[in-house]
Image (cartoon, rainbow, N blue to C red):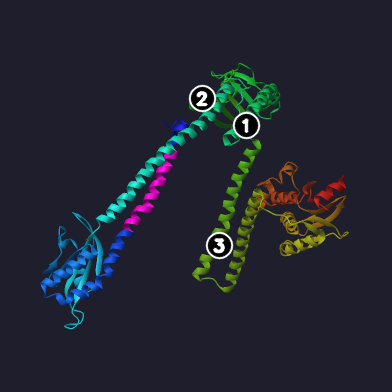
Amino acid sequence: MFRSVKNWLTILILALVALAMIVAWAYVVPPLANRLDQQKLTDQRLSARLISETLIPFLNDGTSLNYWSGVFGRRLNARVVVLTKNLGRLADTLGPDPADIGDFPMVSEALTSGNVTQGVVTTSVGRYAATAVPLLMPNVDQGTVIGLVLVIAPLKDVDAAVAAVQRQLFFATVLVMGISLLLGYMASYFIARRLKRIERSAEAIAGGDLTATVAVTVEDEIGQLAATFNIMAVRLRGAFAQVEYERDRVEVLLNDLSEGVIGLSEEGTVTIANPASAELLDEPVRVGAELDETFPPDVAEAWHESRREDETQAVVFVHGVRTLEATTYPVAGAADFTSIVVLRDVTSQARLERARRDLIANASHEFKTPLFSLAGFLELIDEGNVNADEQREFLQLMRQQVDRLRNLAVSMLDLSRVEAGSIEMQPEDVDLEAVARSVLDEFQVQAQTKDLTLVVDDGEPLTAWCDEQRLAQVLRALVDNAVKFSPQGSNVRVATREEASWAAIVVSDDGPGIPAAELPHIFERFHRGSEERATTSGAGLGLSIARELTEKMGGSISAESHGSGASFSVRLPRAPRRRAQNADS
């Protein structure tokens, strides 16, 4: 039933009409009944004082009491009952009304409070509006209740009026739903017929007839859908023509891929392989070769697992000097291969992962040593068995350990910010010599402990277009390295020079130099040379961060070493990049 747009649209219209009529009933009927009930009670209450003042003088005259009770009963179209304080009945215009006085709780409430009490009471024989009027005798005992008048009016007329309104609403609902059913069905049929045309055209295109179109009769949403469908058909024809063209290019593209792609049949034999696969495996991949002949056992197992689970599987293996990743993909279609194996060279990623693991190990060690030292010093100081000199010595050592922790934390934070690209540059014209002197001043204390001389070579004033704060950070890393590896009593020199549209700042030392084998890797992240690992602490992040920051400022950094001493050069543009590029051209 609900698989047809025509049916569920019709049902939706009926449901909305029904909901609207229910809301109308809730808005009209209950408030109407409540207003009529309240009007009845209001009419009774307005007569309360008159009833009380009129009947009090006749409490001992049964004939007059019955007469006036009947007068008020006829005037109010209600039953009037006069009771004593002990609920003895003095008068009652009972008539045909069978209601029991015990059904009206306002009697006891009025006798207790001395106030007029009203309410609507539902009994087994109907609903009633009841008002209890206490009778007071002011000249005997001020405010004393001596009796009560109960006025009871049936609410049959109210119920009849409400029922009439409900009948009218019901007849209106039936009429409106009938009209809505007819009109909704006609509108739904018209909409469904137009959608059916689009469906038939879609089936024709699915069957291969790309010339099928839909007539656009009305320019509404469905008309727009039909127009869009026709545009899609035109584009499909162009797309199929493009597929024919692209199919001819696939082989060329496969041959140019840097990843190796190997197609395997259902039995696990090679059916196709691109040239990159032969290069990565260091030997040609022969068509018809078995899986076990081409790949190591791990890859063969991943392929079998991919076949069993019908999902992609990946495995990393070492092949000679390379680390390769083989990913197997199930393939659906009529090709002569049912799965492919894609080979990627992940040697650099593997090296980076090893470097990250080394970083974690180094960081854990670097954090552990100063933390244990701090804990030991604090424990000794806390015991109170050290004199003032020893305390000062301990505090000095503790400051050194805190500096180690801070430097490591700052380096790791800088690396994470560089990797996330969250460092913002504020480039301006920066005096290179002024920055160099400022940075060297920060290292004077360290230099004095090794009797080093920190020198800035005098030259012509030279500026570069860069971020002064980040340039200072780069120079700190280079000077820190130079001070760390310089022998006792040697020099650390900083010089500036102009290179066409570039400005260079060079940091040199007289240290042991950098081995030729390690020189290409010194700017890699987490790299620490063998000499550095043996003699110094650190995570191997400083030079890597320096390179990242320099490149973000549009420059480059390089290192040279010829046996004795090392030299690091930072090249920066002398003007904003666009102007610098124009000057180069």
Real-space Cα separation, disc 3 to disc 2, in angstroms: 57 Å
- Residue most toward the top? 288
Which residue is drawn at the image coordinates 69% and 51% (left, top)? 545
- SS for callout 3: helix
Residue 451's x, y, as percent?
75, 62
Say whether marks 3 and 2 touch (CB < 8 Å). no
Residue hosting label 2 = 307
Three-letter code, disc 2: Arg
Q: For residue 374, which numbered disc appears in the image?
A: 3
Q: Above or below — where is 351 with respect to 360?
A: above
| First to last magenta residue range | 12-34
Which residue is drawn at the image coordinates 63% and 51% (left, top)? 416
Residue count near mark 3 (Cα–Cα under 10 Å), binned few <14, some 14–19, many ≥20: many
Q: Above or below — where is 270 with respect to 314?
A: above
Q: Is residue 565 visible?
A: no
Real-space Cα separation, disc 3 to disc 1, in angstroms: 77 Å
- SS for callout 1: helix
- SS for callout 2: helix
Earlier in the chain: of badge 3 and badge 2, it is 2
Residue count near mark 1 (Cα–Cα under 10 Å), binned few <14, some 14–19, many ≥20: some
**Left or right of 241 on screen, residue 361:** left
Q: Is residue 256 visible?
A: yes
Earlier in the chain: of badge 2 and badge 1, it is 1
**Left or right of 33 on screen, residue 550:** right
Which residue is drawn at the image coordinates 64% and 42% (left, top)? 352
Residue 232 image-quadrant placement: top right
Residue hosting label 1 = 227
* Residue 451 within the magenta-colored segment of the rendering: no
Earlier in the chain: of badge 3 and badge 1, it is 1
* Residue 30 within the magenta-colored segment of the rendering: yes
Residue 159's x, y, as percent?
27, 54
